[in-house]
Image (cartoon, rainbow, N blue to C red):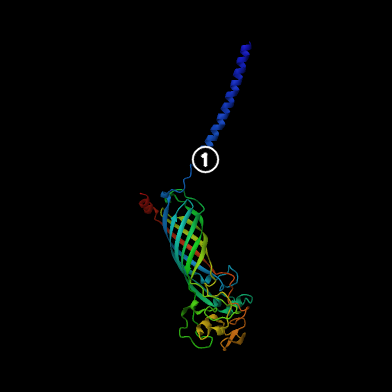
Amino acid sequence: MRILIQVAVVLFLSSLFFEATAQMNERQIKRNNIRMMTFRGKKRGFPPENRYNQIDITLNALNYYGDLSPKPSKLSTDFGFTKPAVGLSFTQRLGPRFSLRSSFMYGSLQGSDAESANREDTENGLFRYQRNLSFRNRIKELSVVAVFDLYENQHTYISRVRWTPYGYIGASVFHHNPQAKVPERGLNGVPFENAGEWIDLRDLGTEGQYATLQEGDINYGIKPYNNFQIAIPFGVGVRFRLNEIMDLSAEFGIRYTFTDYLDDVSRNYVDLGVFGDNELARSMSYRGYELGSSNTLTYVGRDGQSYTVIKGYGQESRDNMRGNSSDNDIFTVITIRFSYIIGKTFNRAKFR
């Protein structure tokens, strides 16, 4: 009887042991299955054979934001002066979400107080209207930007996503040269032979850059600005796959520049007498005389000549601001981008 009891105890304990072991094995199997289902393999980076290149042709629309905007707000622009631009880019896909893009763009910016300012707005618009300045500026830009896609592509260009939002940021260098049309007559009433011709403003030094200013003058120490400038291009876009080798993108970008002279306007008026015999420089510096305003005053300039100007304009004074030097000019770029992928032949040749 004792033996039977011992055998029964051993069998009972054995059954408990096997049942516990089975439950443990079942849990382990479930864990292994989960690991197998979620296993993605070890990431080895973006394989070279998955990289590809593309050529982009862009159609762009440029808008200027600066001292000749309709209002003093940084977001103020005159969409009536939206100007076209064209561009060419070379893009290298270097990662699942990362590309490097080199671009050239050529376009123009434009602004005009007389056409943009609201003269009924006595707080802001009237000042701009009576200032009566205008410009155009042809922009030639070289840029390099990093492009970051929201949706990744771990495979070749053939398996790229159907569409993805993206952002970009980088650096650019551009050449600019603000110009304005020569008025019919000078401040002295004498007609200009080249009236209506576009002329470079930088060479005139409209804010006293080439004049001999005295210590204590508002613009004392001013230097000519450089035609070559740098900017930070950044923006967002969305890209659509058209077929195996073509994409279509739409972008909105901003060029944050480090100059306040895209429009040749930044600081205060100078005494009109400092321009000496250069009547064209004097007449392009202060153009309020073209409006025929009755709210005028006459003063004797540094050269001993008398000048009649609208009150608050064309005279040396801390309050007679021609522009606002505290904010740099910027411009925006709206882009339609057509992309042709050349990775198929390029990569085969490279990695064969």
x then y, percent, for residue 271: 58, 83
Residue topped by disc 1: 38
Report helix, strand or loop for mark 1: helix
State left or right for residue 205 relative to residue 312. Answer: left
Tag count in the figure? 1
The single residue placed furthest to the front in the displayed view is 215
Please tell me in which quadrant of the rendered image residue 121 appears. bottom right
Amino acid type, mark 1: Thr
State left or right for residue 324 relative to residue 149. Answer: right
Between 267 and 23, which is closer to the camera in this rendering? 267
The N terminus is located in which quarter? top right
Between 68 and 114, which is closer to the camera in this rendering? 68
Say few, some or many: other residues with alpha carbon within 10 Å of mark 1 (under 14 / 14 to 19 / 20 or more): few
Residue shown at the point (57%, 32%) measured from the top left:
27
The single residue placed furthest to the top in the displayed view is 1
x then y, percent, for residue 165: 51, 55
Residue 119 in sight:
no
Between 74 and 228, which is closer to the camera in this rendering? 228
x then y, percent, for residue 217: 60, 79
x then y, percent, for residue 164: 50, 54
Residue 6 in sight:
yes
Residue shown at the point (50%, 60%) measured from the top left:
170
